[in-house]
Image: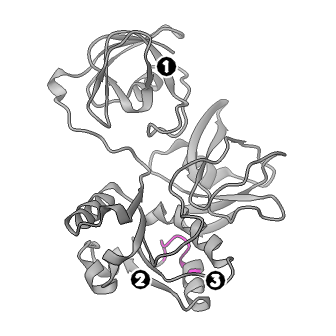
Amino acid sequence: MVSETRECVTLWLRPGRGWPAHLPGQYVRVGVDVDGVRHWRTYSLTSVPGRRDGRIAITVKRIAGGLVSDYLVSHARRGMVVRLAPPTGQFVLPEVVEHALLFVTAGSGVTPIMGMLRALSQRSGGLPDVVHVHISPSLDDTIFGGDLRALECRHERYTLHEHHDDRHGRWDVAELDRCVPDWSERQTWACGPAGLLDALSTRFARAGVSDQLHLERFRPVLASVDLDREGGRVRFLASGKEVETDGTTPLLVAGEQAGALLPHGCRMGICNSCIGRLRSGAVRDLRTGDVQHAEGQMVRTCVSVAAGPIEIDL
């Protein structure tokens, strides 16, 4: 275990035999037993693929109220056993990098990009033309700060722009014009809070270069809904638990709060670990606002809310 900041650690894991090689930028689901209950969370891989010792690394930042992140940061020890699902994710670089790159990251959003940078730095010729804008609360709270600065010293084509909120104030997307004048000509990969990614999406769209922007969101994008018409009583058939829900609480969260042990993984509508069969009623997908009401349909409980009374096979 390597301490990155006061609230962030890198954990080195040794998967079992037959572990598939990952692509830089991908993530894994990690299963951790806390107080006798297994919880799954998703973390980006921050090590290069195919290490000779077979190990992989994930970097975990403690989240306020986060059960698993707090447990790993505080209690992970050598010899601890966790469960791993195979690597997955589409936030990856092309096999051949033919264009200048721009990375924009904030906070723990640097984790998938760190995996990319480490892999690129090992290619013949070293890093290509890369400009990296990294935003963090302070110098001391910069995840991989030392590693990024070392990369800049070793690779003349890698340029790092650090922004520390405590010294520079909140970063504005207009800063791109100053620190990266040719940003609209670069293929861009960005990861961080929703506000940052939304601002980048708007800026790239206005410039007519949306196709050059690639985003990784750690939380799903939620649609606006009329909350006055949402919510309802949810019955989880496998456990017999029932709970009254509103129009903002995902079925997964509502069930857990009611004491139901429900399957889950990424908690953002990607991995399909949390799906359950709808037996009656209707649910609304928080990402799109669409209502699903077909009996027998599989729904993702982490991004769905009740649209009236429902029964679900979980």
The range drawn in magenta is: 140-146
64 or 292: which is nearer to us? 292
Residue 158, compared with residue 294, is above or below; it is below
Give the number of the disc on residue 126. Answer: 3
Tell me where residue 250 sits by quadrant. Answer: top left
**Magenta stretch containing residue 35, yes or no?**
no
> Are discs 1 and 3 less than 8 Å apart at CB?
no
Q: Residue at x 59, y 83 (%)?
A: 151
Disc 2 packing (10 Å; few <14; some 14–19; many ≥20): few
Regarding residue 104, the answer to whether it shows in the image is no
Residue 4 rendering spot, x and y as whole percentages: 59, 69
Q: Is residue 213 left or right of residue 100?
A: left
Q: How is colour applied across the structure in the image?
A: one colour
71 or 303: which is nearer to us? 303
Disc 3 packing (10 Å; few <14; some 14–19; many ≥20): some
**Magenta stretch containing residue 143, yes or no?**
yes
Residue under pointer 2:
161
Tell me where residue 196 sits by quadrant. Answer: bottom left
119 or 174: which is nearer to us? 119
User: How far apart are labels 3 and 2 at the CA level?
Assistant: 19 Å
Q: Amino acid at mark 2?
A: His
Q: Amino acid at mark 3?
A: Gly
Name the secondary structure under disc 2.
strand
Give the number of the disc on residue 276. Answer: 1
Q: Residue at x 48, y 62 (%)?
A: 108
Tell me where residue 192 sits by quadrant. Answer: bottom left
Quarter holding the N terminus is bottom right
Q: Residue at x 35, y 77 (%)?
A: 185
Residue 245, compared with residue 181, is above or below; it is above
User: How far apart are labels 1 and 3 at the CA level?
Assistant: 47 Å
Residue 27 rendering spot, x and y as whole percentages: 58, 51
